Each structure stands twice: as C-alpha cells, then as structure tokens.
Amino acid sequence: MKVSWRKLPTVLLEEEVLDKAFSRSKKAADRVDDSDRTFRVRKQMNRMVQTAADIISTTLLDTVNTWPSLDQSPQFDVSMIDACVGCDDYRHHLSMLQWGARQVTSIAIQNSKKIVRTANTELMHTARREAYGRISSILRRVGPSLSWLSESRETLKRLPTVDHMLPCIVVCGAPNVGKSAFISALSSGKMEVNHYPFTTKQIHVGHFIHRRLQYQLVDTPGLLDRPLEMRNAIELQAIAALENIGSLVLFLMDESEACGTPIVEQQHLLEDVQKLLPGTDMMVVTSKADLLKPLPENWDEVVAAEDEWRDEGSGGEPLLPLLYDLKGRVTMSATEFVGMDAMRLEIVRRVNLARPVDPMALPDGWYRRDQDD
Ligand SMILES: Nc1nc2c(ncn2[C@@H]2O[C@H](COP(=O)(O)OP(=O)(O)OP(=O)(O)O)[C@@H](O)[C@H]2O)c(=O)[nH]1
Ligand SMILES: [Mg+2]
C-alpha cells in the first residue's frame, strides 16, 4: 500500500477520542427501548460499554493501519522517517495504540459479563462506571503516543514526495548556484515546493517526462551546502536517504561566483558530496553559462541545434550538442534556456545507463507507435 505522507488523516488526541466514544455510547444507550426496567438498564449499560470500547479500538487501530509499516516502506521513506522523527519512536507509539485497543476491548468484555450476570440495576451502573474509569486510564497511557503521532504527522506532511520507483535526479551545489532555477527550467508543469522537515528551506521537486517515463528532480537546499564536519546526525541521515533514491547526482558549480561562494569552496563541497553519495553517478555542471566571459565557444551552435529540435517537435533522442565551458565542462543557462534540452537528453542517457531494466520497455518485436514519432 502506498501512502502519501500528505494524506495521513488527523490523529485524535486523548480527550477527543474519549469525548467521541462517550458521547456516541450515550446516544446508543438512549435508543434502547424495553418496558422491563431491569432489562432496559442492562441493555443500556451493556450498549454503553460496548459502543465506547468499539469506537476507541476502531479509532486507534485505524490510525495504526493507515500509517505505513516500516517493514514495507521503501528505504528512502524509512531513512527520512528516521531522520525526521526516529524509527524506534515511530514503532513504539504505533504499538502503544495497538496495546490500547486490546486493553479497551478486554475491559469491555469483562464488564459486560458483570452487567449481564447481575439482576441488580445498581450493580449494572457500577460496572458501567468502572468500565469507563478503566478505559479512561488506558487512554491516559495512550495519550502521549497520540500526541506524538499527531505532531509527527505535521512533520511528515512536509516530506518531499518522491516516487522511489521512478528515476530521480538529485540536484546539489553551494547556495545560490542556480539549483532551483535549473529544476524549474527543466520541469514541465508546476514545480512542487516542499520542505525537509528539519530545515526551514524550501525544496523544489520537479518532473519532466521522456518517453512516458517520469524523471524527478529534487533540490537539496541546506542539506549539502555545509562542510561535512558541521552536519548533524539528522542531516546525515537525510543525505543517506538521498542516496537511496538518486539515480544521478547533478552538482552545479557557479564559475562566475555570482552565488557568493568562491570556487575553491565549491570544490571542497563537491568533494564532500562525492564522499556522502559514493554510490551514485555524478555529473558536474557549470551553471549560469550566460554569465561566463567569454561565452562558451559553441553557444550559437547549441542555440541553433536546440531551436531546430524544438521546431521539429522535440521528438526522439538525438545527440544534441552539449554546451561546454572553457574548461571543457558541460554548462547551461537556466535563465536563457540554452544547453537545457541537450542537458535533459544527457540526463536521460546517463540515468538509463545506470538503470539496466527499463520498466517501460516492450518485448522485442513489439511496436509502439510513439517510439517512431
Ligand atoms: N544569469 C543567470 N542567473 C541565474 C541562472 N540560474 C539561476 N540564476 C540566478 O541565481 C540566483 C540563485 O538561483 P537559485 O535557483 O535560487 O539558486 P539555488 O541554488 O536554488 O539557491 P538556494 O536554494 O538558496 O541554495 C537567482 O537570482 C537566479 O535568478 C542562470 O542560468 N543565469
Ligand atoms: Mg533553491
């Protein structure tokens, strides 16, 4: 089951659960009709206890069931949960809810028996009151777990929504090098704005579609722009999570230094990122090509090739010439949109090299209309 962290339902707190349960059970008792007083009280008390316990155990178990089980979650989600709220706490508090549901059910069974076995209406009332008291004290013990889950829901709602089945390009580099502008320029449709729950910075998640396959682009603001030794455990875990989803790391370098970080420091950051995401293919790219002086030698050639390709409907997978800076490194301008189409096709090639199995591939001999478009 795939759960979007944004769609986790509200978690009711201790008092809210009790109010809901006791008010519904009161209504259920009011509906009881029996001309015999003993029978009527017995049914009423019984109904109150049963209804309250049912509502509470259902409410608690529904929460347990809608929250993703860590054992069945993709590694990226598990690492993110660990970084944001802690996997041990996550498990503990959900299991407290299960415990609470079991206790409440068993209290209802015990006190129902007492109600059924007596003919004394006073004792029936007493058994009902006792059940309510015991149920309330179980809820008192479950209360902190409900509060924890409610707060965690707020945190997890801010997680970037990344589909781990689809290729994902992690975009990094020093602050202001143009990561967000790059993602926005490459993305079709609206860019999602998200947060890593423990930073205040906005993450941009963008997508483009190539041959029906969606490629995700994820920003890393505030995650990778500090020296390794200054990072805390939470950030390191979040970075580890990126390794699990990244098919390709794009590292942007701003040679113009318009970003405010000297190139030497950007170089150090690059080395850190290589250490942090060792298993992921990396492509180092110079950003803001339009600010380079002189402009890249093949600027005009790239502009012409990209224009022509777009005029012809942007089909197929041609080897568009990449834009190169004087050092021989690939570059692009997100603001002028030059070198971007070539870059997109290069990303697709690199990702597919790293992805031996293409889930969209058809068996040999199968014809797919849009492949020849
Ligand atoms: N000339 C030029 N400016 C650019 C280009 N790309 C980005 N910029 C500018 O550089 C500045 C920073 O761009 P962002 O995309 O916000 O950079 P970022 O890396 O996302 O920054 P943080 O999220 O703060 O780390 C903005 O003023 C952009 O307009 C480019 O290709 N050419
Ligand atoms: Mg940004």
Image (cartoon, rainbow, N blue to C red):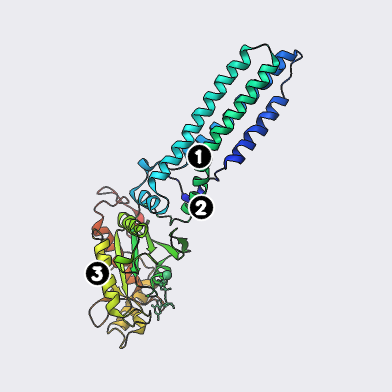
Label 3 sits on residue: 271
Q: Check the image and report above or below for 168 versus 262.
A: above
Residue 363 position within the rendered picture, expressed as x and y whole percent measured from the top left:
27, 47
**Residue at left 28%, top 52%?**
358
Label 1 sits on a secondary structure element that is helix
Instruction: Using the image, tell me which numbered label, if any, was put on residue 154.
Output: 2
Q: Earlier in the sequence, mark 1 or mark 2?
A: 1
Residue 158 position within the rendered picture, expressed as x and y whole percent measured from the top left:
47, 56
Q: Which of marks 3 and 1 is nearer the N terminus?
A: 1
Q: Can residue 167 be seen in this view?
A: no
Q: Is residue 307 left or right of residue 202?
A: left
Q: Check the image and report above or below for 286 versus 139.
A: below
Mark 3–mark 2 CB contact (< 8 Å): no
Residue farthest to the bottom? 294
Q: Nearer the viewer, residue 268 or 290?
A: 268
Label 1 sits on residue: 63
**Residue at left 43%, top 64%?**
204
Question: Residue type at mark 2?
Answer: Glu
Residue 19 position within the rendered picture, expressed as x and y whole percent measured from the top left:
64, 37
Q: Is residue 302 left or right of residue 156?
A: left
Q: Quadrant of residue 289?
A: bottom left
Label 3 sits on a secondary structure element that is helix
